[in-house]
Structures are given as structure tokens and as C-alpha cells.
Amino acid sequence: MTMTPDHTPAGHTPAGHTPAGHTPAGHTPAGHTPAGHAPARRTVVAGALAGAAALLLGTGTGTAAAAPARPLVLRLPAPTGPHAVGATVRHLVDPSRDDPWEPAVGVRELMVTVFRPAVSGRGLPRLPQLTPDAAEAFTFLAPRVRPALPEAGVDWAATLTHARTGARPLPGRRPVLVYSPGGGDSRAMGSSHAIDLASHGWTVVTVDHPGDASEVEFPDERPGRDRVRTTVLRPDLDAGTFRTMIDTRVADLRFVLDALGLDRVGLYGHSAGGTAVAQALHEDARVAAAVNLEGYLDQMDGALLPVAREGTDRPLLLAGTDGFRDARLDRSWSALLGHGGPVARRQLADSHHWVFTDYAALVPQLRAAGLTTAAGRAAMVGGVDPRVSVPAVRTLVRSFFARHLPVPGSGAGSASGSRSGAVRRAGRGSGSAPTARWGRPPQ
């Protein structure tokens, strides 16, 4: 079993992991721009947003009323495992591929965050969910990428994760999980789930897919792109763009395995990321198991992906919501399930598509502050209480990987294996909130 990557392969530059008291590359202290460094943040982000505006203007927001005088600071749920978590941000470069969205870049670049169980993070800074530059871009993009999100009123740069930068990893080798976010989302919106998994002993690598991600911040500029690169996706996504997105994501995931020297991993992904991890499971024998969090298993023209057409002999979990479920999802998932094998389907009640992301906890906070409507909340995460949905999703994914990629010495391989056990644990500690309802829907 290949475990935690503990080195930087030649040609792959670490980014964002610096000694305490030092400023990471590309993040200059306010009021100080050294000679030869990137332009000031406002200039960098303004350039990125100009291109994004041309693609995304004209989309509605459907959000609630005026923003409060003091921007809202959102909070992410804490991890539930016994370990502290450390975080390292890395910049990976694949010179064998051109970027499919911006060929002028000349290579395919990825940004990833590696979350590891840590000895202790006490006294070290908490990793922000979004850096100031990424947050400035996201503030503009949020209501255009996700129409239920507000135009203003949120300090997106103020949300802190529960991982510590510079924390020393626990000794030993650990199984690795790799996360691919949904189309139009960045890896940042999967932070709390990744950190929870790391707190239980896995190493978790979250991957950005530049070009379709809402925004991706690189350590520096290069010809063909800005330091903050924004999405090229439009609201009227066509079949060709969808095919390019999925093919690129599968190639990105396989490159991450190459770059980090991994040969037995678990993958999990949301929406387009779920589609990509299921197909990567089919294509790459290094993938031992995968979780598809509500990603279609076909192309937009109806052609089934090879994984759905041919089946799989390795464990694959299909997890969905009652709010997002449609005929296309049923058709493509049923095609895969019809082959038999180690494939299971689960569905969360009173929920919607983004309940599998950090939005599960964030959108209810926006609703409570009057920054989105009840309809906007329902369209993103459904009506389920986050005290139910967050632990339910965490437990479902964690119990799956505990069976198929267990953490050595954890004793978790069978303790959390049953579906009924996952449902019961999801409801604990949630006060008066109802227990989560997972089911195996009829095929």
C-alpha cells in the first residue's frame, strides 16, 4: 500500500508551506511589494475578474436583500477525529500536457492542498479557507457561479479551517485519499470534510482543476495566465465543454498520483469531481476505491461513460440527494449498478446537491443572516439541518474508506461498516435535530 507522500518530486514546487514567521511566495505583507515580485493584490485580482466578467455577466443571483453593515464571518464545522491536522499547499506542473482551457500556458498546472494528521498544531496559524486574493475573486464570482450566494455581505477571506500550517505530521505511513471538487467549485469548498478525514488518520489531497474551478491562486504569474486564474465555464454549458472538463479532470487525478508517487489510493469527488473519480477508478489500477458524490456517469449527449457501460470490480459508492435526483442520474447510475460488483447507492433525504461540500454548513449561516432566501438555501443544500447533514456525509464516506483503505491500527475496518451504523452515528450529538435518513433507493 502506498501511503503519505513525504517528499517533493523533482520539478514540483512546494507552495504555501513556510517556516513560522515567514511570508509564503506570492503573499506579500500589506504595503510592501518587493522588486521583481507579482503586482499588488488589487491589480492581480482585477485582471482575473475582467475576464471572468465577460463570461459570467448576465446570470441572475436570486439572493436575499441588502448586506449588513459589518460583513458576516462564516464558520466551518470542527473535525471529529483524535488527531490535529496540518496543511501544506503545493504547486504541481505537468510538462507533458498543454492546458486545455488556455493553451498559451504551455503546461498543465495544478494546485493541491495536502492535509495530514499532525503531532500538534497548537500556536500555529489556521489555514484560511480562501486566501485574500482568492477571496476577492470569489466575492465577485460567487453569485455568478452559485446564484443563491450573495453579491456582498460576507468576508470570505475571514473563514478559517481547522488545519494548521506548519504543523509537524505524525510519524508513519498512511493511506491517501484524493478529492476532486464539483465543476465551477474550487478545492477550498471541500476543506472541512478533508480535514475531518485527516483527523481520523488519512492523508487527504484536495485538487483544484484550473480553468473550470471558480478561482485558483498560483504562487506567481506566468505567460498565458494571471496569478489568480478564474473559471472559463459559462451558464450554458455544452456537451463538448462537459466532455473536456471530465477528460481533463481524469487526467489531472492520474497526474497527481504520478507526481506524488502514489500506487494505492482512494478517490472521492463531488458532481463533476464524482464523475471524474468514478472514471479514474475504471481507468487506473492504482485507485483501490472511490466515492462519487452525485456525479453523472454519462456525457451530456447521453453516451454512458466506460465505467457505467462496462462496470467495475473495485468498490465504488454512489451517494446522492433526493433534491438533485433526476432521470439522467438514475439512468447512468442504474447502468453501472446493473453490472453488479462492489457498487452501492445511498441517498440523503431533505437535501440537495451541495450538501456534500462546505456549503452544507455555510449556506444555513447565510440564510440565518438574511443573505440568501429560503429558496436559495433549498436549491443548494435542501432543508436538512447541518447538525444532521454534515456528520451524516462525513460518516458515510469515512466508513466506506475505513472498510476499503483502513488506517493502520485504527480498528476501524469493520466497526463502522454497516449502513445502519452510519445512520445512527450521524444523529448523535445533534440535540433535537432528527436522525439522518440514508436509503438504498429502488433501481
Image (spheres, helix red, strand yellow):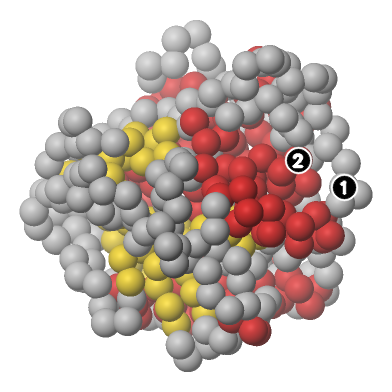
Q: Is residue 434 above or below residue 442?
A: above
Q: Amino acid at mark 2?
A: Pro
Give the quarter of the image for residue 123: top left
**Residue 49 left/right relative to 115:** right
Q: Quadrant of residue 271?
A: bottom right
- Pick whichever of labels 1 and 2 is earlier in the sequence: 1
Q: Residue at x 15, y 37 (%)?
A: 120
Judging by the rendered image, the residue that carries numbered circle 1 is 59
Check the image and report above or below for 386 versus 173: above
Quadrant assignment for the N terminus: bottom left
Disc 1 marks a residue whose amino acid type is Thr
- Label 1 sits on a secondary structure element that is loop
Q: Residue at x 46, y 87 (%)?
A: 95
**Dot 2 lies on which element?**
helix
Marks 1 and 2: CB-CB under 8 Å? yes
Identify the mark at residue 88; answer none if there is no mark: none
Report the front residue among 80 and 47. 47
Residue picked out by circle 2: 143
Q: Residue furthest left?
A: 171
The image position of residue 415, as x and y in percent, is: 24, 40
Q: Is residue 28 left or right of residue 7?
A: right
Q: Is residue 247 above or below residue 371?
A: below
Q: Residue furthest bottom?
A: 96
**Position of residue 113 measured from the top left corner of the image (x, y, whole percent):** 38, 56
Q: CA distance from mark 1 to mark 2?
A: 8 Å
Residue for point 76% across, 33% down = 151
Task: Tell me if mark 2 has few (under 14), some (14-19) or many (20+) residues whose alpha carbon lies within 10 angstroms of its own.
Answer: many
The quadrant of the rendering that contains the C terminus is: bottom right
In the image: residue 151, left or right of residue 88: right
